[in-house]
Each structure stands twice: as structure tokens, then as C-alpha cells.
Image: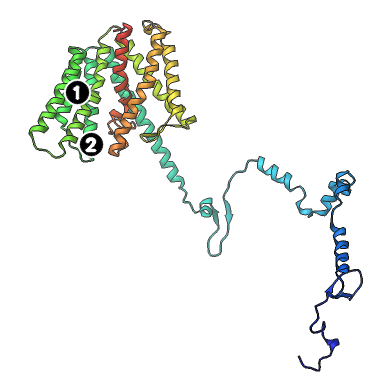
Amino acid sequence: MSDETTKDELPFDQGDEPAIEVDDGTENDFVSTDESDDDAESVDDENADDSTPDWEAMAEGNSNIEDFTSQEYVKGTTQEYQGLAEEVEKASTEEWELQAVAASLPGVESGLVGFEDVSGTESQSEESYEAVEQAAASDLTLRVGSALVIFGLFLGSLLLGGWWFAVFVILVMVVSVGEFYATLRTVGYKPLALFGLLGVIMMGVGAQTDGAMAIAGWGAAAAGATILFYSLTPRRNALGNTSTTILGMAWVGMLSFALLIAAGPNPVAHIFFIVIVIAINDIGGYFVGRSVGRRPLAPVVSPKKTVEGWLGGVAAALVAAAVMVVFPPWESITMTQALITAGVVGVVAPIGDLAESMVKRAIGVKDMGAVLPGHGGMLDRIDGFLFAVPVIYVLFRGFGLL
């Protein structure tokens, strides 16, 4: 800036403090900061008095806020928001149906834009849905058909009695242990299947001819022969193969106790009672667990099984047992005996199911086999019986029913 610049051309004098504009209702008035502090404080006090609420008046109820009506509030708000809350509330209570919309895209013929176009997920065609439905119906037909065949063989052999039922039970054991050994071979084990199969056959024959001690005797003999074979012949993983051979034979061979129950009085009634109670326990546990199950029963071994499902199975077994003993075929079983048996089944049968789940998880398979279309393997269907039948045999002996 040149020396010729006059003082009037400057917004303030050089070397002086800048002036502060104070709006007091007049125009172009300036107050210099060189004025006394008293004048500045008086201006601040006046401005503060204009904006500070009168708290004493509000406390005494004399505030003009009481005169502020809802109509004045509505007038002070944006008109387009009026009734927004009511519209949102109304929309939240209505049911909306998702629909595809017609769209016309440049260079593309008009068509329907599905929700997969927006979400990025691929939807199945109508043909795919029909194929899935047909597969489900076919699977259901296979399940029902195979169940009827097995039940027919069971019922026919039980009514014929004697060796007919013994052959049926032995055949079930042979198929089950064969599935177990075949599954183990897929994961690297080489169990001695011949010894295991002969072991379960002789356990069944011994139960039919000589009683409970024959089951233990033939099982011990087959286990000893397996150990001797692996001791005398050099084989890889001898300990694992010996253990799995004996495990399959001893595990499946427990079904031989069903022949001891069938050899007693009222074989048809007693066997039917056991089968129905175990089946109802399994069915009740499945449906209750699927509908209301929340807490896992054994999360490591079987994550889908729940405490609620287990309790539901026990309750269903108790109800089934209590209803059955009312009818004449089961009048030899008292109500107390029936409830005790059902309670034991509710505890022991799930253990058999968990035992198989543990084995399948250890070897990494879903089913032990596919001999029953729609149901998986035979061992998958009798796992609950393998633990429950020997315990029920002991109970019936204690009740004097055998």
C-alpha cells in the first residue's frame, strides 16, 4: 500500500485494534475495542438477558410454553411429514406379497425381472422344482416300501416263531455287521470280516439253543480267535483291525438277546411291546426336537439331537407304554412295569443312537450302508435296539416275565 493512501480509505487505522460491529438497531455503527470494558460488559449482559430462559417462571408454571399447542407445532413442521408415523405403523401391520415386475431394457426384449436379478442369487426353474418334488415323492415311496417289507418279514417270522424268528434276527445281524466292516474298509481299516460274521451267527444260534451264557461264550471265542490270528500273522495296523473286528461283532451281537425274550412266555406280545416303545421313543424325540429343540444334547457327537427332543422321546415312550398295557395282549405287564421299561428305554435307546453317531463321525460317514432304500443302512435302523434289548431282557427277568 502506497504512502499516499489516505486514512479514510482504510477500514481501520493502522496500528489500532479492528472495530467490532454491534447490531443495536442502527446502521453502520461501529464500536471500537478501545472503549471501556464496562461498555462491552453491558452489551453482553443485554444480549444474554434476551436469550436466557426464565427458569423461575418455568418452575412456577408461568412459562409461555404451556400456550404452545399441537396445532402450532404442526404449522411449524414440514407439511409433507404429517401423518408419517400413522402410515409407517399401518404399513408394518399389513402383509406384502413379493412379485416380479415387468421391465423393458434397451436392447433387450421385455420380460420379467425376478428377485434373483436384484439379489444376485440364482433361482431354480420350474422344471427344477418339479424334479425336486418328484425325487422327494420317489424317496418317500422307497422309504414306505422298504419299511413295509422289513415290517412284513419281522411280523411273519415273529408269528411263526421258533427258528423263523431266529433266522430273521441272525440275518439282520449279519447284514448290519457286514455294513460296518465294509464302511471301515473305505477309510483304511481291514477288519477280519469272516471271524466277525461267524461270531454274530454263532451268538444268535447259541441264544436260540442254549440261552444267555451261549451269547457270551461264542462272543468270547470269536474275539479270542481274532486276537490269535493277528498275533500269529504279520499284518499292518493289527491293533486297529483287531479292535474294529471285535467291536462290530460285540456291538451287533447284542441283538441276540431278542431271541431270549422271544423264547419266553407271550413272545409276540413282549416283542411287540419292546418294538413299539422303542419306535415311539425315536419318533417322539425326532418331532419334538425338530419343532422346539434348542439345547444340544451331545454337540460334539450329534449336534442335531437336543435335550428337548430327548425329553419328548421319553414322554412319548411313557404314554405309549401306559396305553398299551390297557389292552388284553399286554395284560401280563403291569402299569408300573410298563412305565419303568419305557423310562429305561428313553434313557438307553438314545445312547445306542449316540454310539453309532460317534462311530460314524470318527470315520467320517453319514450312513453305514444303503441296504434299505430311503433309510440308509440296517445298522442305522437298529442302533437303538442294540443297547435297549439287553437291558429290557434283564428288566423282564427281574419282573418275572421271563
Residue 347 screen position, x and y as percent: 38, 21
Q: Would you say residue 41 is visible in this rendering?
A: yes
Q: Secondary structure at mark 1?
A: helix
Q: Residue at position x 19%, y 18% from top?
A: 216
Q: Residue at position x 42%, y 25% from top?
A: 310
Q: Nearer the viewer, residue 18 or 157?
A: 18
Q: CA distance from mark 2 to mark 1?
A: 18 Å
Report the colour scheme. Answer: rainbow
- The image quarter containing residue 51 is bottom right
Give the labeled residue for mark 2. Answer: 184
Which image quarter is the C terminus in? top left
- The image quarter containing residue 28 is bottom right
Residue 64 screen position, x and y as percent: 89, 49
Q: Relative to residue 115, is residue 217 depicted above or below?
A: above
Question: Residue 200 shows which numbered tag?
Answer: 1
Position of residue 332 in the picture relative to residue 27 (left or right) = left
Q: Secondary structure at mark 2?
A: helix
Residue 338 screen position, x and y as percent: 39, 11
